[in-house]
Image (cartoon, coloured by chain):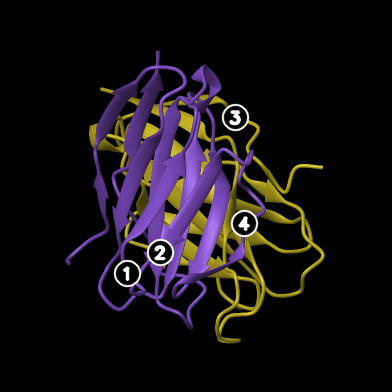
Chain colours: A yellow, B purple
Amino acid sequence: AQKITQTQPGMFVQEKEAVTLDCTYDTSDPSYGLFWYKQPSSGEMIFLIYQGSYDQQNATEGRYSLNFQKARKSANLVISASQLGDSAMYFCAMREGTVGSGGSNYKLTFGKGTLLTVNP
Amino acid sequence: GAGVSQSPSNKVTEKGKDVELRCDPISGHTALYWYRQSLGQGLEFLIYFQGNSAPDKSGLPSDRFSAERTGGSVSTLTIQRTQQEDSAVYLCASSPRTTGYGYTFGSGTRLTVV
Protein backbone atom coordinates (compact mmCIF):
# COMPACT_ATOMS: atom_id res chain seq x y z
CA ALA A 1 0.00 0.00 0.00
CA GLN A 2 1.20 3.48 -0.78
CA LYS A 3 2.14 5.51 2.25
CA ILE A 4 1.32 8.85 0.62
CA THR A 5 -1.45 9.21 -1.92
CA GLN A 6 -2.07 12.30 -3.99
CA THR A 7 -5.09 11.59 -6.14
CA GLN A 8 -4.98 14.74 -8.29
CA PRO A 9 -2.35 14.50 -11.03
CA GLY A 10 -3.29 18.01 -12.18
CA MET A 11 -5.32 20.91 -10.89
CA PHE A 12 -6.34 24.23 -12.40
CA VAL A 13 -7.30 27.34 -10.49
CA GLN A 14 -8.06 30.93 -11.41
CA GLU A 15 -5.76 33.61 -10.10
CA LYS A 16 -6.88 34.99 -6.71
CA GLU A 17 -9.03 31.95 -5.95
CA ALA A 18 -8.31 29.33 -3.29
CA VAL A 19 -7.35 25.76 -4.14
CA THR A 20 -7.09 22.56 -2.11
CA LEU A 21 -4.56 19.87 -2.95
CA ASP A 22 -5.40 16.46 -1.51
CA CYS A 23 -3.09 14.15 0.41
CA THR A 24 -3.86 11.00 2.36
CA TYR A 25 -1.31 8.97 4.26
CA ASP A 26 -0.93 5.58 5.83
CA THR A 27 1.12 4.85 8.92
CA SER A 28 0.88 2.87 12.12
CA ASP A 29 3.48 5.04 13.82
CA PRO A 30 1.85 7.32 16.43
CA SER A 31 4.52 9.95 15.88
CA TYR A 32 4.95 11.33 12.40
CA GLY A 33 5.25 14.57 10.49
CA LEU A 34 3.66 15.73 7.30
CA PHE A 35 5.24 18.12 4.84
CA TRP A 36 4.30 19.94 1.69
CA TYR A 37 6.91 20.95 -0.85
CA LYS A 38 6.64 23.03 -4.00
CA GLN A 39 8.75 22.18 -7.01
CA PRO A 40 8.74 24.79 -9.77
CA SER A 41 10.04 24.04 -13.24
CA SER A 42 13.53 24.98 -12.05
CA GLY A 43 13.54 21.75 -10.05
CA GLU A 44 14.33 23.02 -6.57
CA MET A 45 12.30 21.64 -3.67
CA ILE A 46 10.81 24.47 -1.63
CA PHE A 47 9.48 23.69 1.84
CA LEU A 48 6.01 25.14 2.39
CA ILE A 49 4.50 23.83 5.60
CA TYR A 50 4.84 21.18 8.30
CA GLN A 51 2.33 19.45 10.57
CA GLY A 52 3.32 17.19 13.45
CA SER A 53 1.02 14.33 14.40
CA TYR A 54 0.61 15.68 17.93
CA ASP A 55 0.02 19.26 16.91
CA GLN A 56 -3.37 20.38 18.16
CA GLN A 57 -3.88 23.11 15.62
CA ASN A 58 -3.66 23.09 11.86
CA ALA A 59 -0.43 24.56 10.56
CA THR A 60 -0.49 27.85 8.69
CA GLU A 61 2.25 29.72 6.83
CA GLY A 62 1.14 32.85 5.09
CA ARG A 63 -1.18 31.86 2.23
CA TYR A 64 -0.63 28.16 2.96
CA SER A 65 -2.61 26.17 5.47
CA LEU A 66 -2.76 22.48 6.15
CA ASN A 67 -6.16 20.91 6.75
CA PHE A 68 -5.12 18.08 9.07
CA GLN A 69 -7.77 15.44 9.73
CA LYS A 70 -6.00 12.82 11.78
CA ALA A 71 -8.82 10.30 12.03
CA ARG A 72 -9.20 10.33 8.25
CA LYS A 73 -5.43 10.38 7.74
CA SER A 74 -5.61 13.32 5.45
CA ALA A 75 -3.38 16.39 5.22
CA ASN A 76 -4.70 18.61 2.47
CA LEU A 77 -2.87 21.78 1.47
CA VAL A 78 -4.97 24.90 1.03
CA ILE A 79 -3.52 27.78 -0.96
CA SER A 80 -5.50 30.98 -0.61
CA ALA A 81 -5.51 33.83 -3.13
CA SER A 82 -3.60 31.90 -5.80
CA GLN A 83 -0.90 33.71 -7.74
CA LEU A 84 0.59 32.96 -11.14
CA GLY A 85 3.85 32.09 -9.39
CA ASP A 86 2.11 29.27 -7.56
CA SER A 87 2.09 27.21 -10.76
CA ALA A 88 4.30 24.23 -9.93
CA MET A 89 4.36 20.59 -8.80
CA TYR A 90 3.32 20.09 -5.20
CA PHE A 91 4.44 17.12 -3.17
CA CYS A 92 3.07 15.78 0.08
CA ALA A 93 5.57 13.86 2.20
CA MET A 94 5.65 12.01 5.50
CA ARG A 95 8.35 11.48 8.09
CA GLU A 96 7.85 8.60 10.49
CA GLY A 97 9.61 8.28 13.83
CA THR A 98 10.13 10.38 16.89
CA VAL A 99 11.92 13.70 16.73
CA GLY A 100 14.78 14.16 19.12
CA SER A 101 15.79 10.57 19.63
CA GLY A 102 19.13 11.53 18.16
CA GLY A 103 20.57 9.90 15.11
CA SER A 104 17.25 8.54 13.99
CA ASN A 105 16.49 8.22 10.32
CA TYR A 106 14.01 10.86 9.34
CA LYS A 107 13.77 9.99 5.69
CA LEU A 108 10.72 11.29 3.87
CA THR A 109 8.25 9.29 1.82
CA PHE A 110 6.78 11.32 -1.01
CA GLY A 111 3.58 11.17 -2.98
CA LYS A 112 3.59 11.36 -6.77
CA GLY A 113 2.67 15.02 -6.76
CA THR A 114 0.00 17.34 -8.12
CA LEU A 115 0.73 19.75 -10.96
CA LEU A 116 -1.02 23.03 -10.18
CA THR A 117 -1.66 25.52 -12.94
CA VAL A 118 -2.86 29.01 -12.05
CA ASN A 119 -4.71 30.73 -14.87
CA PRO A 120 -4.80 34.52 -15.22
CA GLY B 1 27.66 27.20 3.10
CA ALA B 2 24.36 28.99 2.94
CA GLY B 3 22.54 26.15 1.22
CA VAL B 4 22.96 22.60 -0.01
CA SER B 5 25.18 22.59 -3.06
CA GLN B 6 25.14 19.83 -5.67
CA SER B 7 27.44 19.32 -8.61
CA PRO B 8 27.34 18.96 -11.47
CA SER B 9 23.91 20.42 -12.16
CA ASN B 10 23.69 18.42 -15.37
CA LYS B 11 25.52 15.30 -16.46
CA VAL B 12 25.24 13.41 -19.73
CA THR B 13 27.06 10.11 -19.83
CA GLU B 14 27.29 7.11 -22.08
CA LYS B 15 25.76 3.84 -21.04
CA GLY B 16 28.28 1.73 -19.16
CA LYS B 17 30.34 4.63 -17.82
CA ASP B 18 30.70 5.45 -14.11
CA VAL B 19 29.50 8.77 -12.70
CA GLU B 20 30.03 10.62 -9.44
CA LEU B 21 27.53 13.08 -8.05
CA ARG B 22 28.54 15.43 -5.27
CA CYS B 23 26.58 16.96 -2.42
CA ASP B 24 27.89 19.65 -0.07
CA PRO B 25 25.39 20.03 2.82
CA ILE B 26 24.75 22.99 5.05
CA SER B 27 27.56 23.41 7.55
CA GLY B 28 26.70 21.68 10.82
CA HIS B 29 23.97 19.49 9.38
CA THR B 30 24.87 15.98 10.41
CA ALA B 31 22.05 14.19 8.59
CA LEU B 32 22.27 13.84 4.83
CA TYR B 33 19.84 12.13 2.44
CA TRP B 34 19.97 11.21 -1.22
CA TYR B 35 16.77 10.94 -3.25
CA ARG B 36 16.07 10.14 -6.88
CA GLN B 37 13.31 11.67 -8.94
CA SER B 38 12.48 9.98 -12.20
CA LEU B 39 10.58 11.89 -14.87
CA GLY B 40 7.11 12.85 -13.67
CA GLN B 41 7.49 10.97 -10.40
CA GLY B 42 7.84 11.80 -6.74
CA LEU B 43 11.09 11.52 -4.87
CA GLU B 44 12.42 8.07 -4.01
CA PHE B 45 14.70 7.64 -0.98
CA LEU B 46 18.13 6.18 -1.71
CA ILE B 47 20.38 6.46 1.35
CA TYR B 48 20.73 8.24 4.68
CA PHE B 49 23.92 9.37 6.41
CA GLN B 50 24.34 10.34 10.03
CA GLY B 51 27.80 11.79 10.21
CA ASN B 52 30.00 9.56 8.09
CA SER B 53 28.02 6.38 8.62
CA ALA B 54 25.12 5.17 6.51
CA PRO B 55 22.69 3.30 8.75
CA ASP B 56 20.05 3.12 6.04
CA LYS B 57 21.00 2.12 2.50
CA SER B 58 17.70 0.41 1.84
CA GLY B 59 16.75 2.60 -1.11
CA LEU B 60 19.82 1.93 -3.26
CA PRO B 61 18.34 0.15 -6.30
CA SER B 62 21.30 -2.11 -7.09
CA ASP B 63 24.91 -2.79 -6.15
CA ARG B 64 25.94 -0.44 -8.94
CA PHE B 65 24.97 2.38 -6.61
CA SER B 66 27.18 3.39 -3.69
CA ALA B 67 27.71 6.49 -1.59
CA GLU B 68 30.15 7.78 0.93
CA ARG B 69 30.50 10.77 3.16
CA THR B 70 33.75 12.13 4.50
CA GLY B 71 34.48 14.51 7.35
CA GLY B 72 30.81 14.59 8.21
CA SER B 73 30.34 16.92 5.28
CA VAL B 74 30.60 16.27 1.56
CA SER B 75 28.91 13.18 0.15
CA THR B 76 29.47 11.46 -3.16
CA LEU B 77 26.96 9.19 -4.87
CA THR B 78 28.60 6.88 -7.38
CA ILE B 79 26.79 4.95 -10.08
CA GLN B 80 28.85 2.32 -11.82
CA ARG B 81 28.16 0.96 -15.30
CA THR B 82 25.30 3.39 -15.82
CA GLN B 83 22.12 2.20 -17.51
CA GLN B 84 19.44 4.22 -19.27
CA GLU B 85 17.01 3.60 -16.40
CA ASP B 86 19.41 5.51 -14.14
CA SER B 87 18.45 8.71 -15.93
CA ALA B 88 16.80 10.92 -13.31
CA VAL B 89 17.33 13.93 -11.10
CA TYR B 90 19.34 13.08 -8.00
CA LEU B 91 18.54 15.32 -5.05
CA CYS B 92 20.43 15.70 -1.82
CA ALA B 93 18.99 17.06 1.42
CA SER B 94 20.49 17.82 4.82
CA SER B 95 19.10 18.49 8.26
CA PRO B 96 20.34 19.04 11.79
CA ARG B 97 20.70 15.85 13.82
CA THR B 98 18.01 16.27 16.40
CA THR B 99 15.16 17.58 14.32
CA GLY B 100 12.76 15.66 12.15
CA TYR B 101 12.03 18.71 10.10
CA GLY B 102 14.00 21.53 8.62
CA TYR B 103 15.26 19.58 5.64
CA THR B 104 16.99 21.68 3.01
CA PHE B 105 17.25 20.32 -0.50
CA GLY B 106 19.87 21.03 -3.08
CA SER B 107 18.96 21.91 -6.65
CA GLY B 108 19.79 18.42 -7.85
CA THR B 109 21.88 16.80 -10.55
CA ARG B 110 20.06 15.89 -13.74
CA LEU B 111 21.66 12.69 -15.02
CA THR B 112 21.04 11.57 -18.58
CA VAL B 113 22.40 8.23 -19.75
CA VAL B 114 22.59 7.91 -23.53
Upstream in the sequence, badge 4 or badge 2? Answer: 4
- Residue A92 vs residue B49, the one in the foreground: B49
In the drawing, what numbered circle is on residue B73?
1
Residue type marked 2: Arg
- Residue B14 vs residue A70, the one in the foreground: B14
Who's the residue at 72% across and 64% down the image? Answer: A70
Residue underneath mark 4 = B57
Q: Could you tell me which secondary element the residue under label 4 belongs to? A: loop
- Residue B41 vs residue B56, the one in the foreground: B56
Q: Are marks 4 and 3 on the same chain?
A: no
Residue underneath mark 2 = B69
**Is mark 1 in CB contact (under 8 Å) with mark 2?**
yes
Who's the residue at 76% across and 74% down the image? Answer: A30
Who's the residue at 76% across and 54% down the image? Answer: A26
Q: How far apart are the alpha carbons under marks 1 and 2?
A: 7 Å
Chain ID of residue with mark 3: A
Q: Quadrant of residue A57?
A: bottom right
Q: Is residue B30 visible?
A: yes
